[in-house]
């Protein structure tokens, strides 16, 4: 058993996303987003929708209470673009801003640092109708949205994250069609969506910085160390290609203003003069979402001729994702060594399991406790070795609308009963609470 003690000012908390928890999709003038359309088209596996989800829009005070009772000092939430600008640009709905205003005041009153993310996948449908992330028309509206929201909240919200996981939006939303808006455009669709998000992010960062000082500006990327299934050269090359697409277009875009050399040829027709400077920005903090490594192999017929290889792993979550805490440790060391030890925090980490409520009315989610313990310990080890990690936020506070899986996959440290909307803190909640309050983990 090793004991890891974290710095006093370490951030402990949870992350959520507007679309996954808020519900109230028609309330107070909110406009439709791509996920509403995707859901209406029958694309959600369990036939559920986010119309109510956790009803956080009406139960936010109770949810702040959960964060507070856990002893968390940070909370990352996302702001719903279609609540603020129902058509994506133009008229602003004050009621939308009011909601986040109240939320932020509530968090601050509870001693919790609000970390706002501007885009967690709920693209206003009218902007998708103009081409969405396949084109450049979204860039201006996104920067303007960032300006509007920060004008209202930046006196109290100091931490601003532009995007959440541009790689997932690009690959699943525009490449394979598994996510909204459901396009199956293959590799070029993915690369276009990635590059245009990079550009929108650069524009939004500049729009906020032009009007405010003293903020912590950043973004959130889902990073997964990519390795080959074995040492066959074609598999090693495939893993490198996927690393370029999945990790480096976003990462090296913002941090280095660089298109990964392995993608340069394919992106020639997408990148215009001046883009590299426009996507680069000296962010103050990078949010890393970590779930697992990726083990890849060469296989034709898939984008970039890459497919999943054997992960060589014996622990799996209910998403059929391998449990690999050492991948998080490797990732954090990579930042220390290759990216100048910039400030990072774990903005999401967690697991879905098939939880049950036992006769005592509780959820004894031992697998999730083990998952969290092992990953927090990996962070502790990295911190001990000089990695500049500022915090750990689990995914997620609540069970929620897990995108194409609907309400069927539970990631929360708090269970949500979707019939009564009752919240039940799971064992994993109590575990994280103990870690947050003591700043110590033993693993
Ligand atoms: C996303 C979350 C999602 C979670 C689990 C991340 O990719 O940011 O919205 O629920 O992973 O799939």
Image (spheres, grey):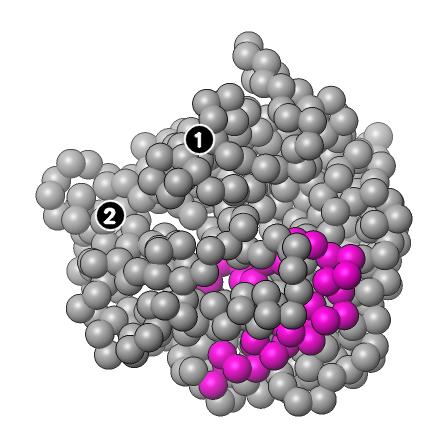
Q: Mark number for residue 329? A: 1
Q: Which region is colored magenta?
A: 137-166
In the displayed structure, 260 sits above or below 25; it is above
Which residue appears at 40% of the width and 62% of the height? Answer: 280
Residue 420 in view: no
| Residue 311 in the image, given as x and y percentages of width and height | 33, 37
| Res 395 → quadrant | top right
Which residue appears at 77% of the width and 49% of the height? Answer: 416
In the displayed structure, 319 sits above or below 33; it is above
| Residue 16 in the image, given as x and y percentages of width and height | 67, 53
Identify the residue under disc 2: 239
Mark 2 / mark 1, whichever is N-terminal: 2
Quadrant for the N terminus in the image: top right
Query: Is 139 inside the magenta-drawn segment?
Result: yes
Left or right of residue 97: residue 389: left
SS at mark 2 in the image: helix
- Density class for disc 1 (Cα within 10 Å; few <14, some 14-19, many ≥20) is many
| Residue 147 in the image, given as x and y percentages of width and height | 64, 74
Q: Nearer the viewer, residue 408 or 379?
A: 379
SS at mark 1 in the image: helix
């Amino acid at each position: 058993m090793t004991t890891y003690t974290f710095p006093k000012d370490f951030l402990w908390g949870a992350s959520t996303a507007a679309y996954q928890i808020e519900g109230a999709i028609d309330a107070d003038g909110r406009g439709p987003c791509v996920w509403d359309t995707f859901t209406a088209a029958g694309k959600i596996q369990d036939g559920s929708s986010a119309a109510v989800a956790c009803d956080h829009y009406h139960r936010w005070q109770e949810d702040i209470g959960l964060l507070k009772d856990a002893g968390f000092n940070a909370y990352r939430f996302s702001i719903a673009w279609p609540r603020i600008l129902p058509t994506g640009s133009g008229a602003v709905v004050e009621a939308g801003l009011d909601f986040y205003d109240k939320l932020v005041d509530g968090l601050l009153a509870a001693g919790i640092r609000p970390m706002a993310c501007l885009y967690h996948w709920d693209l206003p449908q009218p902007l998708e109708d103009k081409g969405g992330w396949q084109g450049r028309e979204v860039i201006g509206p996104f920067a303007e949205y960032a300006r509007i929201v920060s004008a209202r909240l930046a006196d109290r919200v100091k931490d601003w994250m532009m995007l959440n996981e541009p790689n997932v939006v690009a690959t699943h939303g525009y490449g394979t069609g598994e996510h909204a808006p459901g396009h199956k455009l293959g590799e070029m669709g993915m690369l276009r969506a990635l590059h245009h998000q990079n550009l929108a992010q650069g524009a939004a960062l500049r729009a906020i910085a032009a009007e405010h000082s003293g903020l912590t500006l950043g973004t959130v990327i889902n990073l997964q160390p990519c390795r080959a299934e074995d040492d066959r050269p074609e598999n090693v090359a495939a893993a490198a290609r996927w690393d370029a697409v999945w990790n480096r277009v976003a990462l090296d875009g913002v941090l280095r203003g660089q298109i990964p050399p392995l993608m340069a040829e394919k992106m020639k027709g997408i990148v215009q003069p001046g883009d590299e400077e426009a996507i680069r920005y000296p962010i103050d903090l990078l949010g890393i979402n970590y779930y697992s490594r990726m083990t890849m192999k060469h296989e034709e017929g898939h984008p970039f001729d890459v497919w999943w290889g054997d992960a060589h792993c014996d622990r799996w979550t209910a998403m059929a994702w391998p449990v690999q805490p050492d991948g998080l440790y490797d990732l954090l060391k990579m930042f220390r060594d290759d990216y100048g030890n910039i400030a990072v925090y774990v903005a999401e980490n967690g697991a879905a399991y098939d939880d049950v409520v036992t006769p005592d009315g509780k959820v004894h989610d031992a697998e999730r406790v083990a998952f969290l313990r092992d990953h927090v310990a990996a962070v502790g080890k990295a911190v001990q070795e000089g990695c500049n990690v500022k915090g750990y936020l689990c995914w997620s506070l609540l069970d929620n609308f897990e995108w194409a899986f609907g309400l069927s996959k539970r990631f929360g440290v708090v269970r949500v009963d979707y019939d009564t909307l009752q919240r039940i803190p799971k064992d994993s909640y109590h575990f994280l609470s103990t870690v947050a309050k003591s700043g110590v983990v033993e693993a």
